[in-house]
Image (cartoon, helix red, strand yellow):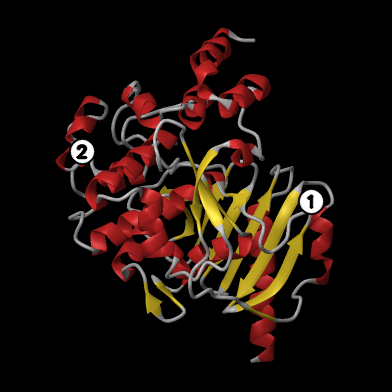
């Protein structure tokens, strides 16, 4: 075992079964969420179930032969036109979204802005979390965290410290900026700071705030949960811990596709959606996307996605009115963005031909 890995193992031995899994596996695993502490997220009192339509691309099943895909769903308009489940999963199985969770947290920040709990994403973090001044520079703004330009760089070791720590906020307090503010460096610490911000400004546990302001309005049709640390009730792992049925995860994509409305109901302002989907700064990503407000933007305002470890994806193409979700135990060698674009283009061409 490498020295850094040994140090992490020793520091986590008191953290219970999740820490034990870290020592054994030395990295996050697809099924970790089953063994972590959690806060239950009951299904909505008014669940929304998408209508089903015709299978769009008959040869799609061949995509899943060489990778562990749990679920692959395609929604066009408000109709579910393709669904594939495997490895014992079904339409009600809660799956861990991993870093797709970050896009949910971003949405909650937008709702908090709409409610006047936060002035704007341009505000200084220290104006709401004075204690964060010891962790982040006084000049760090909320949008710096949303865009991961707050001066934090992390490797697998530091991410694992957050993920498996029995006290996620104590772990946050131990970390320090190690890059210049303004530089893009992907960092789960940024999202966890935003989760702490939500706790402060709402006076509610973030999971409870999400249940009230996002889970219920989106009509989540299945029970889910959020992973938490083990030191306190409801300390949500906002950067990686949201677990829900794939068909419910799709609803966040629909919300952004439709400008902040879901089934005709306004949930988050169109202004927030526009800020998310129209980046002012370019960032590097191997898929050629711009990272902005916890979304990857391929074409500003038109095509974008969220992604998480092991190849979790939510993809949106506004031009073809298409939303796609893919969840699995590994990303595999498949170029999923290319797959999503191919499916989306075929659906768009098919609709154009019918019209």
Asked if one can make out residue 277 in the rendered structure from this viewpoint, the answer is: no
Left or right position of 19 against 117: right
- The residue positioned 52% from the left and 27% from the top of the image is 160
Q: Distance between the residues labelled 2 and 1?
A: 43 Å
Figure check: 330 above or below 221: above
- 55 vs 129: above or below: below
Q: Which image quadrant is residue 6 in?
A: top right
Q: Mark 2 sits on what residue?
A: 129
Residue that label 1 marks: 87
Task: Give the position of the N terminus as an image quadrant.
Answer: top right
Residue displayed at 51% across by 71% down: 318
Residue at the location (82% across, 71% down)?
Answer: 58
Residue 239 appears at what percent x and percent y? 45, 42
Q: Position of residue 159 (x, y in %)?
A: 49, 29
Q: Which of marks 2 and 1 is nearer the N terminus?
A: 1
Q: What element carries label 2?
A: loop
Q: Which circle marks residue 231 in the picture?
A: none
Give the vertical position of 188 relative to 61 (above or below): above
Which residue is nearer to you in this view: 154 or 207? 207
**Side of 103 relative to 119 (left or right):** right
SS state under label 1: loop
| Picture residue at 56% right of the left edge, 7% below the top | 3
Q: Residue furthest top?
A: 3
Q: Where is residue 28 in the image (x, y as percent from the top left)?
A: 61, 32
Name the image quarter holding the C terminus: bottom right
Q: Which of 162 and 270 is in front in this view?
A: 162
């Amino acid at each position: 075992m490498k020295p850094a890995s040994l140090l992490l193992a020793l520091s986590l031995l008191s953290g219970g079964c999740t820490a034990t899994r870290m020592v054994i596996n030395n990295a996050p695993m697809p099924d970790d969420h089953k063994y972590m502490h959690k806060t239950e997220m009951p299904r909505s009192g008014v669940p929304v179930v998408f209508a089903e339509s015709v299978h769009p691309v008959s040869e799609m099943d061949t995509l899943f032969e060489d990778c562990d895909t749990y679920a692959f769903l395609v929604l066009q308009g408000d109709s579910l036109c393709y669904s594939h489940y495997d490895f014992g999963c079904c339409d009600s199985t809660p799956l861990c979204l991993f870093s797709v969770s970050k896009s949910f947290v971003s949405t909650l920040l937008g709702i908090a802005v709409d409610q006047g709990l936060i002035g704007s994403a341009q505000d200084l973090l220290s104006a709401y979390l004075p204690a964060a001044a010891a962790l982040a520079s006084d000049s760090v703004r909320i949008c710096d965290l949303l865009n991961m330009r707050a001066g934090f760089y992390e490797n697998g070791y530091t991410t694992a410290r957050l993920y498996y720590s029995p006290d996620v906020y104590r772990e946050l307090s131990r970390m320090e900026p190690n890059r210049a503010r303004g530089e893009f460096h992907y960092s789960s610490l940024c999202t966890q700071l935003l989760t702490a911000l939500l706790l402060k400004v709402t006076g509610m546990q973030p999971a409870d705030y999400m249940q009230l302001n996002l889970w219920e309005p989106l009509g989540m049709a299945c029970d889910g949960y959020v992973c938490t640390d083990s030191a306190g009730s409801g300390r949500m792992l906002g950067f990686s811990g949201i677990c829900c049925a794939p068909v419910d995860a799709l609803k966040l994509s629909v919300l952004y596709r439709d400008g902040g409305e879901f089934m005709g109901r306004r949930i988050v302002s169109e202004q927030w959606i526009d800020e998310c989907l129209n980046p002012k700064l370019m960032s590097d990503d191997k898929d050629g996307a711009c990272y902005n407000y916890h979304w990857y933007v391929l074409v500003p305002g038109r095509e974008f996605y969220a992604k998480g470890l092991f190849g979790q994806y939510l993809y949106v193409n506004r031009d073809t009115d298409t939303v796609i979700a893919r969840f699995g135990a590994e990303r595999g060698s498949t170029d999923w963005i290319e797959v999503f674009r191919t499916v989306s283009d075929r659906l768009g061409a098919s609709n154009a031909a019918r019209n």
